[in-house]
Image (spheres, grey):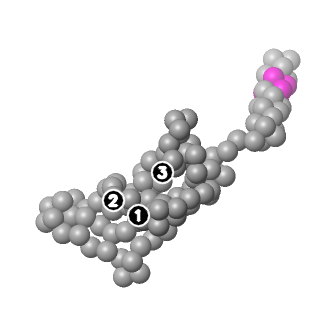
Amino acid sequence: MKLKMYTIYDHAAKAYNKPFYEHTDGVALRIFTNLVNSKEETTIAQYPEQFALFCIGEYDDATGSVSTFDSGKKAIATGNEVKAATEVTPTTEIEKQISQIFQRIEALHETIGESK
C-alpha cells in the first residue's frame, strides 16, 4: 500500500521535522490542525505562524521504496492558515445562533399553518 509522506517545517529552526505517513492530504491536515489548535502548551500551538505542513513524497510498504515529487515538495497549509480557518469569532457564533433561531421560527410557522 502506498502512503503519502508528510513533514512539518519549523521556520525558527530552519528544519523539517521527521516525516510521518498518512493515506491522504486531508488526514495529514487534520493532524496538523489538531497540533496547531492544541490546548496544551506545545511549540506549534504557541507559535503557529512558524510552522507549515508539506507532502514530500510516497512510501510503498509492499516494496519499501520511497518516491519524491519532481518539484521536491507540495505545500499543504501553514499554521496561520489553519488557525485562521478554525477560529470562531463571537460575531460568527452569534450569526449562527440567530440563523438557527430563524429556522426554528419558520418551522413553527409551518407547523402552525399545517394544523389549521
Mark 2 and mark 1 residues within 8 Å of each other at the beta carbon: yes
Secondary structure under tag 1 reads strand
Q: Quick one: which residue is furthest to the front in this view?
A: 13
Label ID, residue 16: 1
Q: CA distance from mark 1 to mark 3?
A: 14 Å
- Density class for disc 3 (Cα within 10 Å; few <14, some 14-19, many ≥20) is many
Q: CA distance from mark 2 to mark 1?
A: 8 Å
Label ID, residue 19: 2
Residues rendered magenta in the picture: 105-109
- Camera-near label (1 vs 3) is 1
Specify whether 64 is left or right of 8.
left
Query: Dividing the image into 4 quarters, which one contains the C terminus?
Result: top right
At 58% from the left edge and 53% from the top edge, which residue is drawn? Answer: 48
- Density class for disc 2 (Cα within 10 Å; few <14, some 14-19, many ≥20) is some
Mark 2 and mark 3 residues within 8 Å of each other at the beta carbon: no
Specify whether 107 is left or right of 49.
right
Q: Which amino acid type is shown beneath numbered disc 3? A: Phe
Q: CA distance from mark 2 to mark 3?
A: 13 Å
Secondary structure under tag 3 reads helix
Residue 20 location in percent, x, y? 33, 55
In the image, is residue 114 part of the stretch drawn in magenta? no
Q: Which amino acid type is shown beneath numbered disc 1? A: Tyr
Q: Which residue is mark 3?
A: 32
Q: Nearer the viewer, residue 12 or 16?
A: 12
Q: Nearer the viewer, residue 23 or 81?
A: 81
Q: Main secondary structure of the magenta part?
A: helix
The image quarter containing residue 21 is bottom left
